[in-house]
Amino acid sequence: MAVTRDHWLERVRFSPEGLVPVVAQDRQSGNLLMLGWANREALSRTLESGQAHYFSRSRQALWRKGESSGHTQQVVEIRLDCDADTVLYRVDQQGPACHTGTPTCFSTVVRPDGSTAQGADPGGHLLSRLATRIAARAVERPQGSYTVTLLDHGVAKVSQKVGEEAVEVVVAANAEDATRLASESADLLYHLLVLLQVRGVALADVLQALEAREK
C-alpha cells in the first residue's frame, strides 16, 4: 500500500470528539510552551505547512498559532507518544507563546503548601535556569553574591577566570578522575555563562550557533 503524507494520522488515537492534546516545546531550550488541541485537519495542515495549527474547543474552529498576534510556531518536528494519544510539536517560537504575553503558558507556580503564585518560568534545562539566575543576580545584586562580584569585575577579569577554569578542565581530563573532571567542567560552564551575561550574549544565541553546526 502506498504511503501518503497523511498516513501517520491513522496511528493517532483521537478522542470521541475527534481531538488529541498537543504539547508545544521550544526545540532549542526544551522549555514547555503550551498545551493545545488538534483535530485531524489541524495535524495535517501542520505537517503540510510547517506552521503549528490547533483546534479551538471554545470556538469550534481551526486556527494557526500567531495568525492574529504574529507569535507563530514554526514546527521542526512532530512526535507521537507511546500510545499515540498525545502529540508533541517541537517548534521555533516567535515572541511569547501565551496570549497573556508570557513566554510560556505555564506561569503559575504551585508551592509546597498548596498556594499558587505567578512567576516567570526559569526554563526546563539546567543551563537555561542557571543563565536566568545569573541574569537575575545582575539586576537584584544581593549582597555577598559571588556572581555579583564577578559581574562587577567586568569582561577582562571574567575572561581570565574562564581561561583558568578551562586549564583546570584540561588538567583534570589528563591527570585526575572522572568526578574531578565533572566538577571542573561545571565550574567552566558556570563562569562561561557569567561571561556571556557580562557581554550581553544570550544563551539562546549560543544554542543557535551549536544547532547550526549540527546540520
Image (spheres, helix red, strand yellow):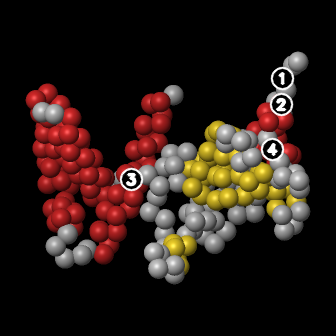
- x and y percent of residue 68 in the render? 75, 63
In front: label 1 or label 4: 4
Mark 4 or mark 3: whose residue is earlier in sequence: 4
Q: Report the amino acid beneath label 4.
A: Arg
Q: Report the amino acid beneath label 2.
A: His
Q: Residues within 10 Å of mark 3 (few under 14, many from 20)?
A: few
Whether 145 is drawn above or below 186: the answer is below
CA separation in Å, label 1 and label 4:
19 Å
Residue hosting label 2 = 7
- Mark 4 and mark 3 in contact? Answer it, CB < 8 Å: no
Q: At numbered mark 2, what does the secondary structure look like: helix, strand or loop?
A: helix
Mark 3 or mark 1: whose residue is earlier in sequence: 1
Location of the N terminus (image quadrant): top right
In front: label 2 or label 4: 4
Whether 194 is drawn above or below 167: the answer is below
Judge by depth and name the residue closer to the eye, 14 or 67: 14
Q: Report the amino acid beneath label 3.
A: Leu
Q: Residue at x 12, y 33 (%)?
A: 176
Q: At numbered mark 1, what does the secondary structure look like: helix, strand or loop?
A: loop
Residue hosting label 4 = 13
Q: Residue at x 10, y 29 (%)?
A: 175
- x and y percent of residue 49 in the render? 77, 41
Residue hosting label 3 = 126
CA separation in Å, label 2 and label 3:
37 Å
Mark 1 or mark 4: whose residue is earlier in sequence: 1
Tag of residue 3: 1
CA separation in Å, label 2 and label 1:
6 Å
Residue 121 located left or right of residue 19: left
Mark 2 or mark 3: whose residue is earlier in sequence: 2
Q: At numbered mark 4, what does the secondary structure look like: helix, strand or loop?
A: loop
- Mark 2 and mark 1 in contact? Answer it, CB < 8 Å: yes
